[in-house]
C-alpha cells in the first residue's frame, strides 16, 4: 500500500485556537515545598507559557486554591501576561470538582485542554484524569509543573501518560503555536518571549541578532 505525504500538520499538534490553557495554583506557598524543579526555572517556564498563550490569543483559565487564607497570590509573571484576567479561587484540591472552573470550561467549549501547575501529583493529576474520563483531550506542560520531590513529579507524569495524557514542555508549547517562521505577524512576539524567558535558546537568538543580524526562517 502506497502512502503519499503532504505538507500539512498532524492533527495532534496544538494551534492557538483549538485548545484552552488551564494554569493551576502557581502560588508562593505551593512553590516553597516544590523540589522537583527550582523556583527560578519554574517561574520562568510559567512566564513563557503564560506570555505565549496571551500573545497567541489562547483561551486561558487561571485558578488558585485558598489564595487569601493560605496559599498566596498567583505568580506575578502570570498576572503580567493576563493583567485583566479573572482568577478563580477554589477550596477543592481537584480543580475539576470546582463548579466555577467547570462553568468556564463549558463556556469556552473546547475539547482540547492544556494544563500546568503545582503540584503535579495533586493539582494536575486530579483534573487531567477527570477531564480524560469525560472525553477531553489532555496535554500537560511538564516543566511548568512541579512537586515535593522528583519522585512525586515523575510518578505523577507516568500515571497521567498511562491514562492518555500527552506531555510537552514550555518552550515546545510556544514553538508549536508559532510552528512556521514565515508567520511574520507573530515572529517578533515569539522571539521576544524566547529572548526574555527561553533560557539558552533565547540567549542564542540575542547573539545571532546582535552579531549577524540573523533571524529564524
Image (cartoon, helix red, strand yellow):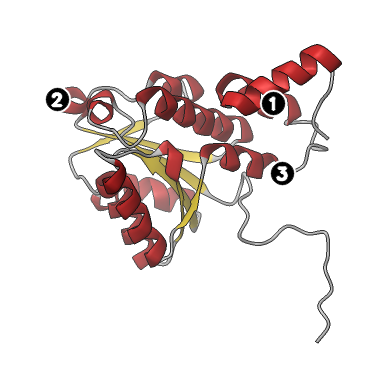
Label 2 or label 1, whichever comes before in sequence order: 2
Nearer the observer, 63 or 117: 117
How many other residues sit within 10 Å of disc 2, few (<14), some (14-19) or many (≥20)? few
Q: Nearer the viewer, mark 3 or mark 2?
A: 3
Residue 69 is marked as 2
Q: Is residue 99 visible?
A: no
Residue 179 is marked as 3
Q: Is residue 87 visible?
A: yes
Q: What residue lies at 61% left-to-right and 30% top-to-bottom? A: 55
Label 3 or label 2, whichever comes before in sequence order: 2
In the image, is residue 193 above or below residue 135? Answer: above
Q: What residue lies at 24% left-to-right and 25% top-to-bottom? A: 32
The residue to which callout 1 is attached is 191
Q: What residue lies at 57% left-to-right and 37% top-to-bottom? A: 171
Q: Residue 117 location in percent, x, y? A: 36, 39
Residue 83 is marked as none
Q: Look at the numbered discs 3 and 1 and tell me whether their residues touch, using CB distance below 8 Å.
A: no
Q: Look at the numbered discs 3 and 2 and tell me whether their residues touch, using CB distance below 8 Å.
A: no
Q: What residue lies at 28% left-to-right and 47% top-to-bottom? A: 151
- Quadrant of image for the N terminus: bottom right
Q: Residue 152 location in percent, x, y? A: 27, 47
- Quadrant of image for the C terminus: top right
How many other residues sit within 10 Å of disc 1, few (<14), some (14-19) or many (≥20)? many
Q: Residue 167 location in percent, x, y? A: 48, 52
Label 3 or label 1, whichever comes before in sequence order: 3
Classify mark 2: helix, strand or loop: helix
Nearer the observer, 148 or 101: 148
Q: CA distance from mark 2 to mark 1?
A: 38 Å
As drawn, the residue found furthest toward the top would be 210
Q: Nearer the viewer, mark 2 or mark 1?
A: 1
In the image, is residue 208 above or below residue 54? Answer: above
Classify mark 1: helix, strand or loop: helix
Amino acid at each position: 500500500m502506497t502512502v503519499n505525504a503532504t505538507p500539512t500538520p498532524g492533527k495532534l499538534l496544538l494551534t492557538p485556537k483549538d485548545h484552552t490553557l488551564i494554569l493551576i495554583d502557581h502560588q508562593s506557598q505551593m512553590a516553597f515545598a516544590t523540589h522537583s524543579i527550582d523556583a527560578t526555572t519554574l517561574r520562568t517556564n510559567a512566564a513563557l507559557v503564560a506570555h505565549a498563550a496571551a500573545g497567541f490569543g489562547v483561551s486561558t483559565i487561571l485558578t488558585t486554591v485558598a489564595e487569601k487564607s493560605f496559599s498566596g497570590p498567583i505568580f506575578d509573571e502570570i498576572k503580567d501576561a493576563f493583567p485583566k484576567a479573572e482568577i478563580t479561587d477554589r477550596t477543592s484540591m481537584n480543580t475539576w470538582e470546582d463548579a466555577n472552573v467547570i462553568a468556564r470550561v463549558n463556556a469556552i467549549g473546547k475539547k482540547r485542554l492544556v494544563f500546568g501547575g503545582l503540584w503535579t501529583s495533586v493539582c494536575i493529576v486530579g483534573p487531567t484524569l477527570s477531564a480524560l474520563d469525560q472525553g477531553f483531550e489532555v496535554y500537560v506542560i511538564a516543566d511548568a509543573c512541579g512537586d515535593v520531590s522528583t519522585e512525586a513529579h515523575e510518578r505523577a507524569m507516568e500515571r497521567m501518560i498511562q491514562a492518555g495524557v500527552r506531555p510537552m514542555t514550555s518552550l515546545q508549547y510556544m514553538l508549536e503555536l508559532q510552528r512556521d517562521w514565515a508567520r511574520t505577524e507573530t515572529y517578533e512576539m515569539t522571539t521576544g518571549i524566547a529572548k526574555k524567558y527561553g533560557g539558552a535558546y533565547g540567549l542564542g537568538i540575542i547573539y545571532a541578532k546582535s552579531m549577524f543580524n540573523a533571524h529564524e526562517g
